[in-house]
Amino acid sequence: MIINKNGGVNLGNKKIMSLAFLMLLLISTVLYGCSGGSEEGSEGNGETGGEGESGGEKVLIFGRGGDSVSLDPITVTDGESFKVTKNIFDTLVNFGEQDTEIEGGLASEWEAAEDGLTYTFQLEEGVTFHDGTDFNAEAVVANFDRWAAGDADQFPYYGSMFGGFGDEEGHVIESVEATGDYEVTITLKRPMAPFLKNLAMSPFGIASPTAFEEQGDAFGDNPVGTGPFKFVEWNRNDTVRIEKNEDYWIDGEPKLDEVVFRSIPDNSGRLNALLAGEIDLADGINPSDAETIEGDENLQLFERPSMNVGYLGLTNTREPFNDPLVRQAMNHAIDRQAIIDAFFEGRGEVAKNPMPPVISGYNDSIEGYEYDPEKAKELLEEAGLGDGFEMELWAMPVPRPYMPDGQKVAEAIQSDLAEVGITAEIVSYEWATYLEKAANGEADAFLLGWTGDNGDADNFLYVLLDQDNIGSNNYTYYENQELHDILIEAQTEVDEEVRNDLYMQAQEIIHEDAPWVPLAHSTPLLAGGSNVIDFKAHPTGSDKLSSVDLE
Amino acid sequence: MADTTVNSKDVELQKVAGPWKEAWRGFRKSKIAVVGMGIVIFFILLAIFGPLFTPQGINEQNMAERFQPPSSTYWMGTDDFGRDILSRVVYGARISLWVGFLAVVASVIVGSILGILAGYYGRWVDTVISRFFDIMLAFPSILLAIAVVSVLGPSLRNALIAIAIINVPNFGRLIRSKVLSIKEDEYIMSAKAIGMKDSRILFSHILPNSMAPVIVQGTLAIATAIIEAAALGFLGLGASAPTPEWGKMLADSRSYLTNAPWTMIFPGAAIMLTVLGFNLMGDGLRDALDPRMKS
């Protein structure tokens, strides 16, 4: 990280310093490599041992693109972490199997007061955490107390979903009380429409109070929940191993004895591992490989229901993108359909709004910007940029579910822009650096996307485009007071219809201001061996594997 | 270089052909070497004049014509953007040769200076420079190149710089050893004896006389440099899109290997042929220039 920063920002001396640094780093890497060798060998053995037993034991190996950040879900925001924690922890309420309708979870029933301020949850009885601690109302309260006592660095998602922490003014949760052994009452300061949906999100998995009190910060390395699988071991950047929870509170689940999450960063490498039978399930399948998989009788293709958006963000504070005319011109200049046909292999649809059509409140009456280079040129002319301009076009270095190949999409956009006189240079950084620099507003225009966490419009429009989120998820620095007022009003509006109306208005404002070029809503693909039964890909990107079986 | 040739001609009254002419005669005897040179010349001509005659624009995308197999319109087919691969391969020759030549010339210059200093002055100068070479050679060269590019930032120019840097120690060592043997020769002794300045001895006598192995090594190094440039391009550390660099074209074709193999075959073949040409030519040159190999 240090090297990246130096290399990127400073000149001369610093570069030499970084070179020297690099030499050191290389040497240490080589040395580390030597010492790591034997260790890796033993891991390898362990794994083959596991596979060898699969005659009696059902072990599912899930290949994915990256490692988890932490296994304490409340401390992270990344999908790769939730993919694992969703199977170790349960939430009070759950999403449906393949949608974001709310169903019972650890709370079997709940009741919301008329005014939308009090929620009473009846908890499942006879549930225990993996460490033997009883699950009851006290445990739920302990979890909420822990979260509310944190801060944005510690528990980022809690703050952004519930408006803050502890005594902060924005914090929406007034109190969480145990009103019985198995009854919890949550009181809100103001109504919050997506409250239940927020509770169903993976970060709010209920953890064992004994375990997190004992372990403190180390809890992320030894997670203890009530979920269908128990944590076994985690080899960083390689595998996370979880095993069957024999005492799981839902009868007959889980069906698998063990699940291993294995990181294979390269998409084609992961597919090859699947073809070779090294893994049973792979996510992040290239759309171009879909046909091959469908034609192979040993494999099956899974489509994840689409709940995402891939977009080209235009940093609104940078010249010339501070001019809405230029931003609209960009929207007219890019041929989205061609991009989707070519690089999503048609598995996606053209985006005209910042959120996908499955989300309620989607405004279908908006007319998307047509692909029209002439119109784009006119708009540029009007903005005083008739001769075009030069810009940097940032392309993400890794395949994402909402955009299988950022580099190629960037190349197509580059050529579209050249047609209207804009010269774009494609730039890319290592993923973490890319996000950091984009968040700092250093990009002219950047490719990025978002997968919805809870199926609510708020999770797209407010999170991605409200001025409150500049510096976090609003990478474009787009600011509009009118929009902000609408989005905040929508958050507290409990009447579904009024709320949807507000979101429709919001989308019109966004369409007019054009802070993005929305590109596509993709259908992410997964593939598995034909022996995988009952795997259902969830739109949020993290899948509960309790009902999955192996033949 | 010209000096010595003229000198020797003067002395021997043109009865014997000069060493360069002799070398050329030796080189011509090897058919394979001549073929190699033919390939090299072909690619050089292609690089200079080819882009003037390419059938299609190199960066013109035509989504309707994606993945066309080779045909009479598209001799090498089209890629994932519907661009004509022939035009891109031809233009790529210019990039690859340019990078290869320039990187090698740069490393020859820097390597020569360092090598001469080390060889001629010896002692601590030699120790410092030679240890520096040793350290650089301790890394696998491509790894070092990747490291350099990641510090400087990925671009074709920086890839060129990286390749130049990693080749410096090879030339430096070569020249150093040559200088070590030449400086003991009598004519250098006499030059010293009549009070010739160090700089003049170095650049008029020692440098020209150590050039033969450098030419051989240089030719072979161009081949390696082209591969290294392609490797960096493949890893996304070289030319940026949409530049039709061969290594980058290979990387772009990776996902379509089974469906559209021509997207990979032609740039791959171009790399292979150029490298083969330079290697054959380099081998021939070595045989011709190295007196010990003469029958």
Image: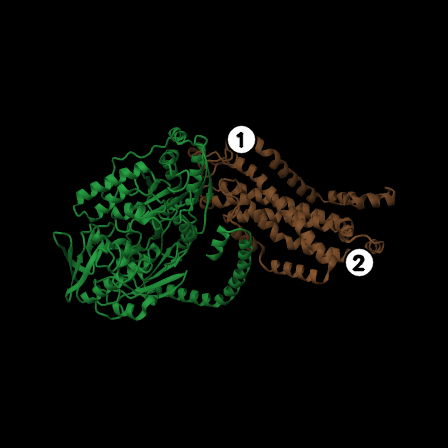
* Left/right of residue B10 with respect to residue A434 in the rendered view: right
What chain does badge 1 belong to? B
Tell me which amino acid carries mark 2: Glu
- Quarter of the image for residue A155 reads bottom left
Q: Which residue is mark 2?
A: B184
* Left/right of residue A392 with respect to residue A15 in the rendered view: left
Q: Which residue is mark 1?
A: B55
In the image, which disc is placed on residue B112?
A: none
Mark nearest the camera among 2 and 1 is 2
x then y, percent, for residue B266: 54, 41
In front of the other: A431 or B117: B117
x then y, percent, for residue A548: 28, 57
Give the chain ID for the brown colour. B
Q: SS of the residue at dot 1? A: loop
The N terminus of chain B is located in which quarter?
Answer: top right
In front of the other: A266 or B121: B121
Same chain? Circles 2 and 1 = yes
- Quarter of the image for residue A203 reads bottom left
Tell me if mark 2 has few (under 14), some (14-19) or many (20+) residues whose alpha carbon lies within 10 angstroms of its own: few
